Amino acid sequence: MILIMQMIKICTMLMIVLIIISCLFFNTFLHAQEDTPATVSSQEELPNEIIKRTPKIEMYRCDECHDSEESFNSKIRPMAKDKDHESITTFHPEKKDDPNFWCNNCHASKNYNKLILQSEEKISFNESYRLCGQCHGPTLKDWKNNIHGKVVGGWLNNKKQHSCTSCHNAHDPKMKQVDPIPEPTRSKKS
Amino acid sequence: MTTDRSKRNKLFLEKKLEEKIERRTFLKGLATGLGLALFSPEKTANALSFDEFWQKHYKELTPEDKKRIFERIEKQTLERHHTEVKISDHRPMDGVEFVYCLNLSKCNGNRKCVEACQKENNTDRSFSYIKVLEMENGGFNLEKGTTHYLGPVPKEGKFYLPVQCNQCDNPPCVKACPVAATWKEKDGIVVIDYDWCIGCRYCQAACPYEARHFNFRTPEIPENEINPDQGYLSNRIRPRGVVEKCTFCLHRTRVGKLPACLEACPTGARKFGNILDPESDVAKIIKNERVFVLKEELNTLPRFYYFFS
């Protein structure tokens, strides 16, 4: 009888020790993850849900015109006036003379429905912030902390974050001057 | 009409300066002598009901009182504005104090907030709780800013400074009110009981940010634009002759939503949240950015912060 009791005691002790050890291991594992650098990988948890871009892009889906075999005509040229992208007149960043910078630095050749990162990873248009973040690291960090950009939906929950291209035209990202809403005045007859 | 009003106000204020007495006692004392002159013309015109006249201060209302009063307001709004509205009375949440942060590097003076505020808060379309000042770069003299700028914005050499109620922690307006019709709530929002307000405009004069507005006329709101989600202490349709101001959209923010001006801002300059939560956006901004407030020297302790980032 006493022997059995002793056995049970030893067993529980062992279990507790095991649990503690596994906890420690798990912890170091977690910390290692936190320490990974600032670039956004697809798995990384963003603080907020990102508002999807694809429903807002009129031209999407691109494969309605560009089939998946089509590769880029990498000759730098203005988009033809009578063609479908004539509004894309400037490229960003402004490196028109740089033969190495063209649509294909951001858009995936042979898969027009996707964007492409420098790592060759193809990403959805809904993740374009990762594309921008490659060259705008500090802004991306501010954006994640909601200092740059905009979170809507609520301050407590239901937070939804606008992606970079909600505000910036990817091809001409500098903010333009706008006409303000007129000032409300007494004299205005409503 | 105006002379009537000013006479009334003057008489009233003289009295008030002597001592702070409760409105009820005061009204009782003078009711016979002054008769109807005591009431604003608006209230007389709309034949203030017995119920309305004897309505208690907000803080003394029982749940039954509130139910009855809200139903009355809903009915009146249906009659006068032909719109079905719902009056709500959300109380401050525990462990929440609101703070607003505005990034002046981003604001471009587009006045989308001004417009959204009018619609959300059922204000007369001749003014807004938000004034956007166009300021000379480098200077910070509010008196030098102008609200009368025209497009296109932003202009070279200027920056844009939206000003609205600062929800001061030490609010001079609250101290100025002779009848305690305006007070600070637990979450920091300064509110007004429009049914208790006597329209003396003391608070308006006391506010260093010119955030308070007095309704000289019955607010004119396009009927199809009336916002039916109405807070008793915030955006319900005000009568003529009372003071009103920004309430951080408490009918929205006390249920976790964001103020209408923030949602409308296309530049992302506006940030809002709970300062008591160290993980909130505003807590991080106040910790990490160089924030400042307007007219700090007056020690009003605003809850509305500005920063450049």
Image (tube, coloured by chain):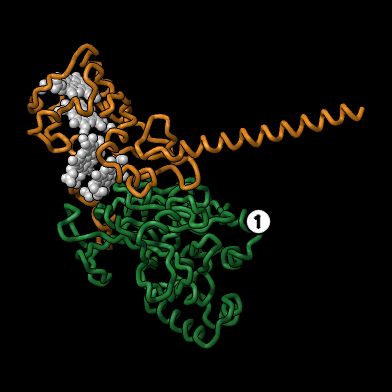
Asked whether A38 or B196 is in front, the reply is A38
Density class for disc 1 (Cα within 10 Å; few <14, some 14-19, many ≥20) is few
Which quadrant of the rendered structure holds the N terminus of chain B?
A: bottom left
Q: Is residue B80 left or right of residue B59?
A: left
Residue A170 visible in the shown view: no
Image point (49%, 63%), residue name: B191
Q: Colour of chain A?
A: orange
Q: Residue B199 at what x, y percent from top left?
A: 45, 72
Name the residue at the bottom extreme: B18
Q: Give the quadrant of residue B200.
A: bottom left
Rendered hue of chain B is green
Q: Is residue B125 above or below residue A23?
A: below
* Quarter of the image where one finds residue B121: bottom left
Farthest residue, direction top:
A69
Image quadrant in which you'd find residue B244:
bottom left
What residue does disc 1 label? Answer: B63
Viewer-nearest residue: B54 or B212: B212
